[in-house]
Image (cartoon, rainbow, N blue to C red):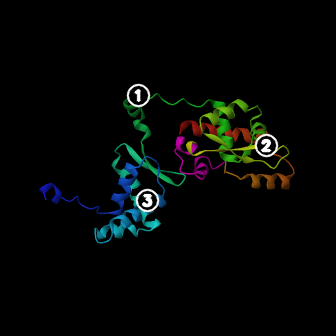
């Protein structure tokens, strides 16, 4: 046996180290369960006799993996080395920091993404805070037709059809996508309430109950200024 064969790669010293390596090496965002499954699979393939530490990591609980993720997030934030650990809709991945965008785009030879128009931002804000929502309800709030805007937002994968309404004709209901969360740096839709507390997200069933109780549908003029404000905030994110 050669000396090269005798050289052993040091084992991982912490769960945080393994989790960081998995996130760095993955070609897609990972969930806690993805990481947990990988730890178990490696232990089964290696065997306890091969490396006892592998078995220890295989027993990591979801809470322990979540703690490791939070530790990585805090450490990257403290170091300020150009990228962060972000959570989007229950998945985790590394992302370069926005302040470094111009240099990253130059390196990758990519153009700056097109900014959304003002009408598109306002329509997107309405969908984000009122989803699932029908086109007629969007138009009631904005006071204009939104066919072309909806089409554009769907082509950008920011909005998608999420179902059908119970109203006559069963019109489509629209909602935001994972790309929307990624584009605006949101972990989940609950973060929208933190962006603008005056526009708490509401479900369709809650709005129907409120309209039935009051027997009056809110006028577009009551809602439009609030969504204009939300559009301003989204434009700055």
Residue placed under numbered mark 3 in the picture: 35
**Residue 109, label in figure:** 1
- Crowd tier of the residue under label 2, counting other residues whose Cα lies within 10 Å: few below 14, some 14–19, many 20 or above: some
Q: Is residue 205 left or right of residue 61?
A: right
Instruction: Please state which of residues 116 and 236 is positioned toward the viewer in this rendering.
Output: 116
193 drawn magenta = yes
Q: Secondary structure at mark 3?
A: helix
| Residue drawn where x is 36% and y is 60% of the image | 16
Distance CA(mark 3)–CA(mark 1): 32 Å
Quadrant the N terminus occupies: bottom left
Residue placed under numbered mark 2 in the picture: 171
Above or below 41: residue 131: above
Distance CA(mark 3)–CA(mark 2): 40 Å
- Residue 58, image x, y percentages: 39, 67
- Residue 121, image x, y percentages: 63, 35
Looking at the image, tell me whether mark 3 or mark 2 is earlier in sequence order: 3
Q: What stretch of residues is rendered in magenta?
A: 180-198
């Amino acid at each position: 046996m050669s000396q090269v064969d005798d050289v052993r790669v040091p084992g991982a010293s912490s769960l945080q180290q393994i989790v960081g390596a998995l996130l760095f090496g993955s070609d897609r965002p990972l969930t806690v369960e993805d990481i947990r499954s990988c730890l178990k699979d490696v232990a089964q393939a290696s065997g306890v006799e091969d490396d006892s530490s592998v078995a220890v990591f295989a027993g990591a609980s979801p809470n322990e993996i979540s703690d490791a993720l939070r530790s990585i997030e805090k450490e990257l934030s403290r170091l300020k080395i150009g990228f962060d650990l972000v959570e989007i809709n229950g998945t985790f991945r590394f992302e370069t920091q926005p302040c470094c965008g111009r240099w990253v785009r130059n390196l990758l030879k990519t153009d700056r993404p097109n900014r959304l128009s003002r009408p598109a931002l306002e329509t997107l804000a309405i969908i984000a805070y009122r989803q699932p929502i029908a086109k007629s309800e969007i138009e009631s709030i904005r006071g204009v037709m939104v066919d072309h805007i909806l089409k554009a937002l769907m082509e950008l994968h920011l909005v998608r059809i999420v179902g059908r309404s119970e109203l006559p004709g069963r019109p489509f209901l629209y909602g935001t996508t994972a790309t929307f969360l990624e584009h605006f740096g949101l972990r989940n839709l609950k973060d929208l309430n933190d962006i603008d507390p005056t526009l708490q997200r509401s479900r369709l069933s809650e709005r129907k109950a409120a309209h039935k109780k009051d027997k009056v549908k809110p006028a577009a003029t009551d809602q439009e200024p609030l969504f204009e404000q939300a559009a301003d905030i989204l434009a700055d994110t």
